[in-house]
Amino acid sequence: VGEATAELSYCLQLAEGEVRSQFQQSPQHQYRNIFGSLVDKGGSKESFYHEMETNPGLQGAVKPAVLNLANMIRDVERQLVIIENSGGLPETLLHGDVHYDNTLCDLSTGRVTGIIDFEFAVFDWRFMEAAVGLSKYVGEPNPLPFVVEYLSGFMRRADWVTDKEIEWLPTLIKLRVLETVVYFVARAVSGEDDISQLALRAENYAKRVTWIE
C-alpha cells in the first residue's frame, strides 16, 4: 500500500497543473485547516473546545481521553504554526484518503491493483498522503512493523521526499488522526450523527497519538 500510494502521489503531482487550471480552489478543506469541517457547518474553534469539555455524551469514563485529545489538538495547532512560519511544506494535488480500506489488491500476489474513493481530493501538503495511510496503522496493537513496511514501500517510489517532510511526518500523522476528532464533533453539532461516534473512538485516537509521540 505504501508503494502504491507513492506511485499515485507522483502521478497526481504530474497532473496538478492541469487540475489547477480548472479548479483553483480545493473542493475539500486542507488537513492543516484542522477546524475546517466544523467551520463548514457553522461552528468554530471555540465551539469545538466547548463541545469537548461540556457535551454530555463525552462525560464519564471517556472524559480523560476526550480532554487528552483536546490538549493534543492544541499542541498540533502550535506545531502547524511552526511549520507555516518556516515556509510550509511542498504542496500538490492529493487523493486525500489513501489507506488499506480504499485499496484493491490481488490476493494471489499481494499487489495493489486499484485505489478508490477520490471524494476527498485536495490541494495540500503532499506528504499528507503518506500520513493518512500511516494514521490507520498506528491504531494496530503492534504498529511498528506495519509502519516500517509501509514507509519502506513508500520511499522506494518517492525519491522526491525532502528532509523537512520526513522531520514533520509524525506531526502530519497526528494531524490526520486529530482532524478526524473535529470531523465527528462537526457531524454531531450539525445533527448528521451522534457524538457517541467520537466517544466510541476517543480512547483509540488518543492511544494512536500517544504512540506517535
Image (spheres, grey):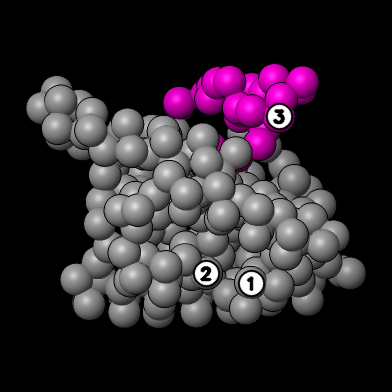
Picture coordinates of residue 104, whole percent (x, y):
64, 22
State the CA–CA distance, disc 3 to disc 2: 27 Å
Q: Which residues are magenta?
A: 98-119
Picture coordinates of residue 87, whole percent (x, y):
19, 71
Report the amino acid beneath label 2: Pro
Report the amino acid beneath label 3: Gly
Q: Is residue 5 left or right of residue 67?
A: left
**Most extreme residue toward the left, as rendered?**
21
Residue identifier under label 1: 212
Magenta run includes residue 133: no
Q: Residues within 10 Å of mark 3 (few under 14, many from 20)?
A: few
Q: Is residue 60 visible?
A: yes
On the image, which quarter does residue 56 sit in?
bottom right
Q: Is residue 1 above or below residue 204?
A: above
At mark 3, the secondary structure is loop
Q: Is residue 54 visible?
A: no
Q: Is residue 180 left or right of residue 158?
A: right
On the image, which quarter does residue 21 sit in?
top left
Picture coordinates of residue 193, whole percent (x, y):
67, 37
Q: Residues within 10 Å of mark 1 (few under 14, many from 20)?
A: some
Q: Is residue 210 above or below residue 192?
A: below
Mark 1 in CB contact with mark 2 (< 8 angstroms): yes
- Depth check, mark 3 against mark 2: the one in front is 3
Q: Which quadrant holds the N terminus? A: top right
At mark 1, the secondary structure is helix
At a point 34% along the width and 58% down the height, the residue shown is 161
Query: In this orientation, which residue lies closer to the viewer: 59 or 87?
Result: 87
Residue identifier under label 2: 170
On the image, which quarter does residue 66 sit in?
bottom right
